[in-house]
Image (spheres, rainbow, N blue to C red):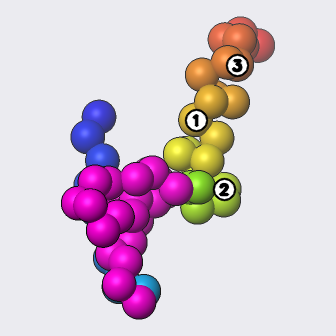
Amino acid sequence: MARKPMAAAVVGSLLIVVCDDGSVFELDPNGAWVERAAVPGTAAAHADEIRRQEPRFD
């Protein structure tokens, strides 16, 4: 699944983008995208936890 940018903001000289899954990226001065802490409560914030979960059959 591809991430889609949903919001962007300029803070000082930084460009910050929030994607549809809650992940956050920052464009550093060298032109490289750096992933930052995800928005709490989103799929991106819990991605590692979700991957480690055992399948549940009730």
Amino acid beneath label 2: Gly
Q: Which residue is mark 1?
A: 47
Answer whether labels 3 and 1 touch (C-beta < 8 Å).
no
Judging depth in this view, the residue of 53 and 12 nearest the camera is 12
Which residue is at a point 32% across and 54% down the rendered structure image?
A: 33
Q: Residues within 10 Å of mark 3 (few under 14, many from 20)?
A: few
Label 3: state its secondary structure. loop
Q: Earlier in the sequence, mark 1 or mark 2?
A: 2
Confirm whether the magenta stretch covers residue 44. no
> Residue extending furthest front?
30
Which residue is at a point 70% across and 19% down the rendered structure image?
A: 53
Q: Measure the alpha-carbon separation of dots 1 and 2.
A: 11 Å
Q: Residues within 10 Å of mark 2 (few under 14, many from 20)?
A: few
Residue 29, image quadrant: bottom left
Answer whether labels 1 and 2 touch (C-beta < 8 Å).
no
Q: Which residue is mark 2?
A: 41
Q: Residues within 10 Å of mark 1 (few under 14, many from 20)?
A: few
Amino acid beneath label 3: Gln
Disc on res. 28: none
Q: Is residue 21 above or below residue 18?
A: above
Magenta segment boundaries in residue numbering: 12-36
Image location of residue 20, percent across then percent down: 38, 57
Mark in front: 3 vs 1? 1
Label 1: state its secondary structure. helix
Disc on res. 53: 3
Horizontal relation, residue 44 to residue 5: left or right: right
